[in-house]
Structure formats: structure tokens, C-alpha cells
Amino acid sequence: MVENCESPFALLQDGRRVHVIERDLTEPDRIVGELLQPGGYLKLIELGLQDCVEEIDAQRVLGYALMKDGKSTRLSYPLDKFEEDVAGRSFHNGRFIQRMRGKAATLPNIRLEQGTVTSLLEEDGVIKGVQYKTKDGQELKAYAPLTIVCDGCFSNLRRNLCTPKVDVPSCFVGLILENCQLPFANHGHVILADPSPILFYPISSTEIRCLVDVPGQKVPSIGNGEMAKYLKNNVAPQVSILHELQDAFISAVEKGNIRTMPNRSMPANPQPTPGALLMGDAFNMRHPLTGGGMTVALSDIVVLRDLLKPLRDLRDAASLTQYLESFYTLRKPVASTINTLAGALYKVFSASPDEARKEMREACFDYLSLGGVCSSGPVALLSGLNPRPMSLVLHFFAVAIYGVGRLLLPFPSPKGFWIGARLISSASGIIFPIIKAEGVRQMFFPATVPAVYRPPPLN
């Protein structure tokens, strides 16, 4: 069972027979999954799926603009070494998904079926397939030597294949702004607002997606008008920094098409199970602030495809599972870098009454505004173009040290030393728990993981 069609397409290209069971084959209507980073676009090219962002009015994305307290800075993706078409893309998620489904359906060895998987079929500890209910209510079973489970963030199957620890730090409130222009064309815009960031990016030639982050698991009610009141009274004044968007924002609120989506974070904590593999948001999630989810998913698919390519027979479940354990380490450079950055940036960019956290937020904005490697380095990490966890740690603590320097210059003071020490402590408290959850050994010392060197099982 799959969540969308990029994974089966990769397997279909290798001549395998694939049975795709989708919960709903109509065009999805979501407020997330609308931004693909340049690193993700490069993975699309590797998979032969780059034309899936064509003919859907997708918009090229060349970087980000950050706004804070009346100041702004533009951060461009470091794309000089790539072909001209390489950039980020933003679009309606449903249009993109339908293009991928259509692409997969053109291949002869696929069976694409609408149905709801209710359980995994297990015999002697080996997953043999799935039980599912068809569109017309029939209960059927489907068998396969390898079942790929990627049923999304609301997965009801992940507990069989991993130990999930889902955190919901906030919710996104989504609006579509029409017939207005962003100050920096072809850039996502992030307002470092109170209490947390507000995002804007184009999803078509006439529409701009606005995502308002609301901390916590509960948001004001849409039905009784509390949400519209919150957006007008609390958010609209902070959107005024983007004069071009304020009227369109208020108009979108009044129109009433307001959507919400919980922001989930879940480290990959696999429980290797013969006959099955977990992928996508069912397996690993990060805060969507940086728009890295699809890049991680596409990178995972490339890793899995390359691992499966030399295998013609997948029926030895025990040997296959042992061999595929390397997947969990080989995916780490891209996945852990994007996951860690997303979690850390969300905490740094969110407002806090703590003075040290305030200084960290200010230092981060000013560090990125310095230009050169201070902006290109972090943006390369965010975009999936530099999958090196150590670079992330170095830049993160460079921000912290830069913040301490601001506190101590030109004249050190006891208060400056005290806040500086708390700033370093706060920075450590943000990033080290995320790294621990991702796995220190897999992130920084993957060569020490024995599974990386396991040869493919003999057919």
C-alpha cells in the first residue's frame, strides 16, 4: 500500500509488478506538501519524474525572504553549479499527486486500485501482504513478497513496523491569497511573528499559500468565528510588514475558506519486520516549517530503489530484511539533516519570553543576513543540496557564538556573560535532543554501522 505514486514508479521502472492500493484516487486537497526543495527536484530527475511538475502551473522557487521587526533579508539557493531548470517548485499538492499517478499508470506492470487497507497479513512473524476493503465494500486480501507501507501521517499501520513517538508542537492554519504579489518574486516568505512564524509562497500564477503557525494542539474554532477573529486581530497586524499582502490576507479570512492541519514530528524508529518496509510520513515526520518532507521522501525512494535494483527475487524475507537494514543508515545524511534543521529552526524562530531565546532568534536573523557562507551554508542544508549533518551543527553553533559575541561587544558586562552562557545552554538544549532522537551513530559515524556493508542476498 502506498501514500502516493513516486515509490511504485521507481520499482516499475525496474520491471517489477506493483499493486498500489490507495485510500482515495481523487485529487487530494491539502494545505501541506506544496513546496519541493531543489534537493527534492534533483531526486525527481533521478527518478525520471521531473515532468510531474509541468502543466500544473507550478512556480519556480529560488530561495526565501525573512522578515522581522520591519527588517528583511533575502536568502537565495546556491544553484550556480546546477542546470538552469534546477530550483525549488511550489504547486497545488493534488495536481502534483495526480501527475505522478498518471505517470505510473502508463506502465504496463502496475495495478492501481482504490481501497482502504485495514490490516497487514502476518504469518510466523513475516508480513505476507494486506487485507483491504475495496471502494464497493468488498473485503479482499493482496499478497506480495514485499509490502511497502506509506499511508501518511495518520497511519494506522505504523505500530506494526516501528515504535512511534509522535509530537504535535503546533498546527498550521491555511489560507489562499488571490491576485496579489510577493515582494520578492519566486521566493518563499517567512515572517518571524509572535508567537511563531507565518509563511507565504506561491502555489500557482494567481494564488499564494499562507500558513499561520499556531503553537499547541488546539486552535481557535473555525465554526464559531473565533479563528477568523484571531487571524484578524492577532495575525493581520503582523502581516502588515508585507504591505502587498495585507488586504488579500483579510479578504481571504473574510471569504472563510480556512483550513487547519496539525504539525507532526516523529523520529524514524524502525522495527525491521520481514516482508514489509515503512516509508513516507508513516515512518518519519519533521516540522513542515522548512518544507523538507517531500525531499526526504523522494531521497528515501532513491535509496530504496538502488538497494533493490540488484535483486530479482524478493521472496527470501529474512535475508531481504537483514539486507534492507542498511536503508535506515543510508537515508540518514539527507533525512537527519533536514529533520534536525526543521526542528531546530522552528524552536529558534518562535517567540519566547526567555531573554536567551530572544537573543538566539535575533542572532539567527542577523547571521543569515550577513550573506556569503553565513546564508548560503544554512540555505544549502535547508534545500537538501548539502546533506551533511556536521555542517548543520557547525552553522547552528556559529549562530550561538555570533549571538554571544553581540552580547559581549563592544564592552563585556556580567549580564552579557550570563545571558551568553544561557544562550549556549539554550542552543544545546534545542539541537542535542533532536540529534539524539535521530541517532548520533547513524548521523555522524555511518561507516561504523555493520548493516551498511551487507551484500545483496543471492537469488
Image: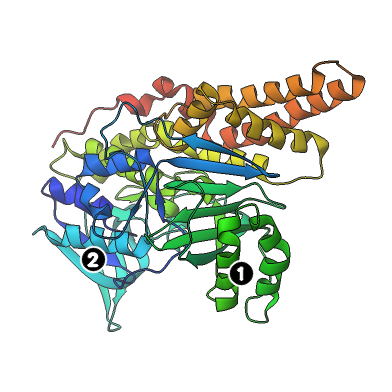
Residue 3 position, x and y percent, is 34, 60
- In the image, residue 138 sits, relative to residue 77, either above or below, namely below
The three-letter amino acid code for the residue at tag 2 is: Ala
Category of crowding for the residue at label 2, using alpha-carbon neighbours closer than 10 angstroms: few (below 14), some (14–19), many (at least 20): some
Residue at 57% of width from left, 47% of height from top? Answer: 190
Category of crowding for the residue at label 1, using alpha-carbon neighbours closer than 10 angstroms: few (below 14), some (14–19), many (at least 20): some
Residue at 83% of width from left, 28% of height from top? Answer: 419
Helix, strand or loop at mark 1: helix
Q: Is residue 403 left or right of residue 31?
A: right
Q: How is the image coloured?
A: rainbow
Quarter of the image for residue 38 reads: top left
Would you name the residue on which mark 1 appears? 250
Residue 101 position, x and y percent, is 23, 62
Quarter of the image for residue 349 reads: top right
Quadrant, the C terminus: top left
Residue at 30% of width from left, 83% of height from top? Answer: 137
Quadrant, the N terminus: bottom left
User: Mark 2 to mark 1: distance in Å?
Assistant: 50 Å
User: Residue farthest to the top?
Assistant: 411
The three-letter amino acid code for the residue at tag 1 is: Ile
Quarter of the image for residue 411 reads: top right
Labelled disc at residue 348: none
Labelled disc at residue 142: 2
Residue at 42% of width from left, 56% of height from top? Answer: 33
Q: Is residue 178 left or right of residue 223?
A: left
Q: Is residue 348 left or right of residue 188?
A: right
Q: Nearer the viewer, residue 15 or 448?
A: 15
Q: Nearer the viewer, residue 215 or 406?
A: 406
**Marks 2 and 1: CB-CB under 8 Å?**
no
Does the image show residue 52?
yes
Helix, strand or loop at mark 2: strand
- Of mark 2 and mark 1, the one earlier in the sequence is 2
